[in-house]
Image: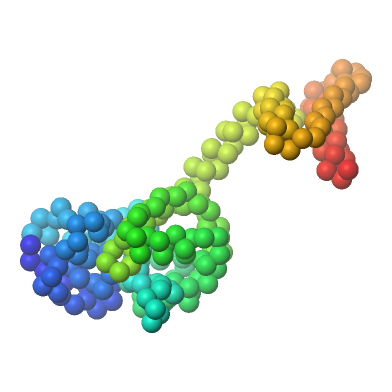
Amino acid sequence: MSSLRCPGSIVNPTRCDPRHDAVQSDGAIALVPDRPHHVTTSGIHDLHPSVTADLLAGVLDSSHDGIMAFRSRRDRAGQIIDFEWVVANPVARRIVGRESHELLGHGLLELMPEVARGGLFDRCVQVADTGQPFTADHYDNYGGVDRWFWTTAVQVDDGFAATFRDVTEQRHAHEALVHEKLHDTLTGLPNATLLDDRIEHALQGLERWPGHVGVVAVEVEPLNRVADALGHSASSELLAEVGRRLEHSARAG
């Protein structure tokens, strides 16, 4: 396949290298090294020779997923100290709240030093150094993003490329379903299913940490008279308030 030139709107100015069969972008997502274990998120290995750089750019720009690629920055000992941004498609730029000129050529830690916390940066280093990809469902609050993402990172030349999809709404919907399954719909209090689960976990914990497990049963009287006089919503609110006070007292003690 003949070499392709990648437009500067997608990556930093490119350079062609006869050792590669496709676009060379100094570690960008379009790079296809001659080492078979290196892969790209774009599947460029399967591109037809007639594919143009404009078409490749269109694929990146029309993707519903965020796509980023980075080139490693190493110290004299060869250790990765940062990653330089070389690709950021429109979705990625919108999520991080920056334009191309604010990202491309800049360091990941330079712009988002908080990435060093929580182990995400270390996992990216592992991908770039070992070629072992990772996929994770993770919470991202870097730079005030405050979203959940499904992320896949793969090695690309001396760096890595990552695709990520915003799954915040799906995550919240799932959490709502789980909460509904384990809580009473009227009072919002944990139901018998959740009680059984907590008791089982507590008993299992005694096998590792000997101690005691207590269960408190409280009967609210006269609940029926409250419901008859003020309605079921009032009795439900009474139960919920009793539950809140018990929970507060248990945590305080």
214 shown above or below 19 = above
Count of numbered tags:
0
Relative height, residue 126 to residue 185 (above, below):
below
Query: In the image, 115: left or right of 204?
Result: left
Residue at 47% across / 48% down in the picture? 137
- Quadrant including the C terminus: top right
Asked which quadrant contains residue 247, the reply is top right
Answer left or right for 146 relative to 59.
right
Position of residue 7 measured from the top left corner of the image (x, y, whole percent): 22, 72
What coloring was used for the rendering? rainbow
Residue 112 placed where, x, y %? 50, 71
The residue at the point 58 percent across, 39 percent down is 175
- Of 12 and 113, which appears nearest the observer? 113
The residue lying toward the viewer, choosing from 153 and 7, is 153
Q: Residue at x 68, y 27 (%)?
A: 200
> From this viewpoint, is residue 145 visible?
no
Q: Residue furthest bottom?
A: 76
Image position, residue 28 (x, y; %)? 28, 68
Q: Quadrant of residue 162?
A: bottom left
Q: Is residue 76 above or below residue 31?
A: below
- Residue 249 figure quarter: top right
Report the side of 110 relative to 128 (left or right).
right
User: In the picture shown, does residue 167 fall above or below 201?
Assistant: below
Residue 246 seen in the current view: yes
Residue drawn at (57%, 33%), measured in percent from left and top? 177
Q: Nearer the viewer, residue 245 or 71?
A: 71
Quadrant into which the N terminus falls: bottom left
How far across and how far down the image is residue 135, in percent? 40, 50
